[in-house]
Amino acid sequence: MLEAILYILYGVLLLVFVAGVWRLRYAYSHFQMKGVATTPHDSADLPSVTVCIPARNEMHAMTECLERVIASNYPKLEVIVLDDHSRDDTSTLIKAYAHEGVRFVEGSALPEGWLGKNHALQGLLKHASGKYVLFMDVDTRLSPDSIGQLVEYTLREDVKMVSVLPRRDDGMRSSVLFSTLRYFWEIMFHRKESPATASNAWLIHRQTLIETWQGFSAFKSAIQPESKLSAALMATNDYRFVIGSQLLGISYEKKWRSQVETSIRLLFPLLGSKTSHGIIAFLDMLIVAWPLFVLLSGFVYGWGIHQLLSGVLILMFGGLYYSYLRRVRSHGRVLGALLWPIIVVQEAIVLVMSMERYERGAVTWKGRVIKVPKS
């Protein structure tokens, strides 16, 4: 009986692997910028862009973020940073860049029913004047050509919104090697009703956002308002998702602990805030990681056909993950692929933490409690 169950699991994992290969092939053919280069324009013909950055206690990352933004060679650029009641010297640091054209906006009191970041985005939008608005996180890094490349792609595709999966271009650090699978899941579970969306950097047509949804008012309590926007615009073919590239030059740097906290905040809501969905997802992750435990059992019970098959499956899934890492990471791709089963176990643990913290009402963003109503 046990033998039969084991072989059934091998079959299931083989089907999961085939599905993963198909999803990544789809992503590589649909989410690439394929040779886009900034075409020389008369600056009068270019649309204006407002870069909007919400900040709360961001002293550790603000300087490099702003240095990269103001180094942009895009000619019609406005930069606004909103300080959302930081308890450190973030506001002072932002104001120090006034001579570089960076506008400081002080955040207002958080109204009832709004999530902190969503209210900060709304505040930024009210001060923006560009035809397009580029919302980006403080841990996002731009190259001088990034904004021009992104605008060129948006105009060529004739869409209202584009979000970018940022690359990891920093070195062999634990925060890179043990990155969570947040964007990997976005690619794997992309569909028209719930398209892959990145929150680190996303460009949107300002008037569309204001006139259709009154800014973020329609999504004031959404954990990821950009995902709600992308889903609505995907229905009219007005949204694109792009995997970052060296050409595009959009990357990010985030500590491992911050990645875990972000995943805790996002995972359970992405499963509909339903415990049953969370349990199923947790069991699915354990099944994917299961060959690791079978392989390790060889050190206790000896080596046989099951350890061999498990080793093959680990290499197959590691190769699949390596294919993904080649496109999103500059360093540590081979080692990251070898760590695949450990990364999956880590993700399963983070999912349990997400479910448990939401149950206790202990999930926070920048010190503010986030609650998701149960469906």
Image (tube, rainbow, N blue to C red):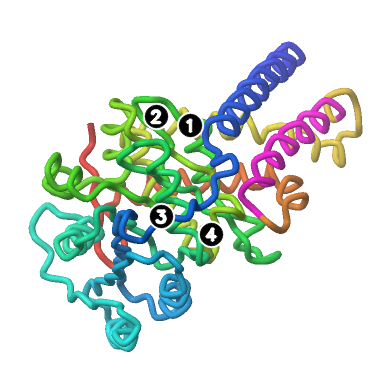
Q: Position of residue 72 (x, y in %)?
A: 45, 69
- Kindly indicate whether the residue at mark 2 contacts the one at mark 1 (C-beta within 8 angstroms): yes
Between 245 and 148, the residue placed more toward the observer is 148
The residue carrying mark 1 is 281
State the separation of the CA atoms marked 1 and 3.
28 Å
Describe residue 20's horizontal placement relative to residue 232 as left or right.
right
Secondary structure state at the residue bearing disc 1 = helix
User: Callout 3: 10 Å neighbours few (<14), some, many (20+)?
Assistant: many
Task: Identify the residue position indicated by label 3 in the image.
Answer: 201
Q: Which contiguous range is marked in magenta?
A: 308-329
User: Could you say where residue 260 lies in the image, as x and y percent from the top left?
Assistant: 48, 56
Q: Amino acid at mark 1?
A: Ala
**x%, y% of residue 165?**
50, 48
Determine contact: label 1, label 3, CB under 8 Å: no
Q: Position of residue 347 (x, y in %)?
A: 54, 45
For the residues labelled 3 and 4, the Cα–Cα distance comes to: 9 Å
Residue named by callout 4:
251
- The alpha-carbon separation of the residues under discs 1 and 4 comes to 29 Å
Residue found at the far right of this picture: 303
38 sits to left or right of 231:
right
Q: Quadrant of the C terminus?
A: top left
Q: Are marks 4 and 2 in contact (CB under 8 Å)?
A: no
Residue 168, compared with residue 234, is above or below; it is below
Mark 4 or 2 closer to N-term? 4
| Residue 179 against residue 312 in the figure, above or below | below
Q: CA distance from mark 4 to mark 2?
A: 32 Å
Label 1, residues with CA under 10 Å away: few <14, some 14-19, many ≥20:
some
Q: Image quadrant of residue 147?
A: bottom left
Residue contact at pointers 3 and 4, CB within 8 angstroms: no
Type of amino acid at the residue the image marks with label 2: His
